[in-house]
Amino acid sequence: MIDEQAALQDLLQKGIRLPPQPDILLELNERMQDGNYDAASLATLIARDAGISGMLFKVAASPLFCRASAPDTLEKVLVRLGLKQTINLVRAIAISNKVPAASRLAFHRFWTRSREIAQLAAIIAEDRVTVCNIFPDQAYMTGIFLECGVPVLMQRFPDYANALLAEGFDQPSVKEEDKRFNVDHCTIGYLVARHWRLPNFVAQAILRYNEVPHEDLGEVRTVVAILQLAIHCHADIHRSSNPTWDTVGADALDELGLRQAALTGYMADIREAFLLKGI
């Protein structure tokens, strides 16, 4: 268990500040909690932030979501993405608004990877929902926030983005981060999730996603298993390495009720479902 106050103080001493929730996100959260919203009213609210609006248009026009013509109004964007998924994307976009220009190339690759892993996690969750009781929007939310500590590190350390690009931009290494920057994206991501009052299982999954927890953590263990399989599918699709799977794969499959012998066929099905949306 992390001592949050001590961890926050440690970050401050290293010159790292957690991004505050923007006012627009606080108001969106209030409306979602009150149930007083629809696509038109949320679009009007989101339109007040040009940066977030522009990024949502870009996401909705990407092959992952765009099966026909790209939406031409923000209300249509929200309908295309789904209201819950829109809120999750707004949260993720808000974290990255201050990434310096020098890190934009690395950030673009990070953002694309995060969205693809989140989408794969949602597909897996939808397929395994009767076994695991994690819903697609929950898996997507955790996936899109999984490495939210990365843009925070990009803001603090100018050479962090270059280090990621030099390493081929596979899964960031916590061990390497600790060695080079004396801090890691998992701890920062956990603190961001807690600071922004995301569901506890999201925060715990961010902190512990490098291993499938053996303790009785219920939905945390399940969503970590979904994320690990999503990361493995992503590596397979992009023909990149995923050495972590060797240590977590068996536990992840067991948690999701899948057999190793059937994994190749299962991953082919997930890949097909993903490619139907495009990458």
Image: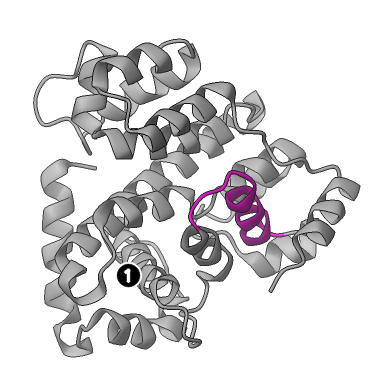
Q: Amino acid at mark 1?
A: Leu
Q: Nearer the viewer, residue 156 or 11?
A: 11
- The location of residue 54, given as percent across then percent down, is 40, 17
Which residues, given as a range, are shown in magenta?
184-199
From this view, report whether residue 197 is shown above or below residue 245: above
Residue at (58, 27) in percent of width and height: 97
Determine whether, in the image, residue 205 is placed left or right of residue 239: right
The answer to whether one can see residue 14 in this image is yes
* Residue 274 image offset from top left, x and y in percent: 18, 52
| Residue 194 among magenta residues | yes
Is 219 on the left or on the right of 60, as rendered?
right
Q: Which residue shows up at 38% across the image and 33% down it?
A: 34
Residue carrying label 1: 229
The image position of residue 238, as x and y in percent, is 31, 56
161 lies above or below 36: below
Residue at 34%, 55% (x, y): give it: 138
Does residue 182 appear in this view?
Answer: no
Element type at marker 1?
Answer: helix
